[in-house]
Image: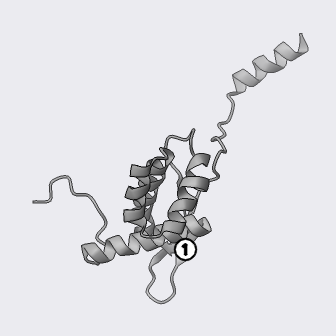
Amino acid sequence: MRHRVDTFKIGRSGSHRRAMLANMASSLFEHGKIETTLVKAKELRRFAEKLITIAKKNDLHRRRIAVSRLRDKAVTKKLFDEIAPGYAERLGGYTRILKLAQRRGDAAEMCIIMLVEAGAPEKKAAKPEAEKAEKADEQK
């Protein structure tokens, strides 16, 4: 039975899918963004965000978990030392997917998956009433 099993199969075996996600996550952490198909990007987002959350607690056990999943010690070091500290205050949403045109050969939906700016808090638009109150206080 498949109870509570939720994954994109992407037309590959389990071992092939895990290896592909490890390679794609390594490239994402190394370069900051990659271009891929939409289905692969959605699955990569789940994989990469879990790794960043693991890396936010910087201890030996979590480093070993990350190395076992990423299979690249240099990229794991970059993840723990450079990428994760920038997201210390962020509770999630470390990646962004931007859709592109369809691929010419097979009409697959293409996209760019990228890491959002580390350390930059989300900007929310201020309410108009709050702006009016601030201006009124400044004039008094």
Q: Could you tell me residue 129's position as x and y percent?
A: 70, 22
Viewer-closest of 36 and 59:
59
Secondary structure beneath dot 1 equals strand
Q: Residue at point 50% right, 40% down?
A: 91
Give residue 2's position: percent from left, percent from top. 14, 59
Task: Identify which residue is drawn at 63% across, 41% down.
Answer: 122
Residue at the far top: name it.
140
Q: Which quadrant of the figure has residue 128? A: top right
Please give the name of the residue rendered at 45% of the width and 67% of the height, measured from the top-left corner. Answer: 41
Position in image of residue 139 (x %, y %): 90, 14
Could you say where residue 137 lies in the image, as x and y percent from the top left? 83, 13
Judged left or right of residue 60, residue 4 is: left
Q: What is the quadrant of residue 81 in the picture?
A: bottom right
- The front one of 69 and 138 is 69
Residue under pointer 1: 35
Residue 96 in view, yes or no: no
Q: Nearer the viewer, residue 113 or 28?
A: 28
| Residue drawn at 29 percent across, 78 percent down | 12
- For residue 16, say whether it is visible: yes
| Amino acid bearing label 1 | Glu
Q: Is residue 106 left or right of residue 139?
A: left
Where is 91 relative to 68, above or below? Answer: above
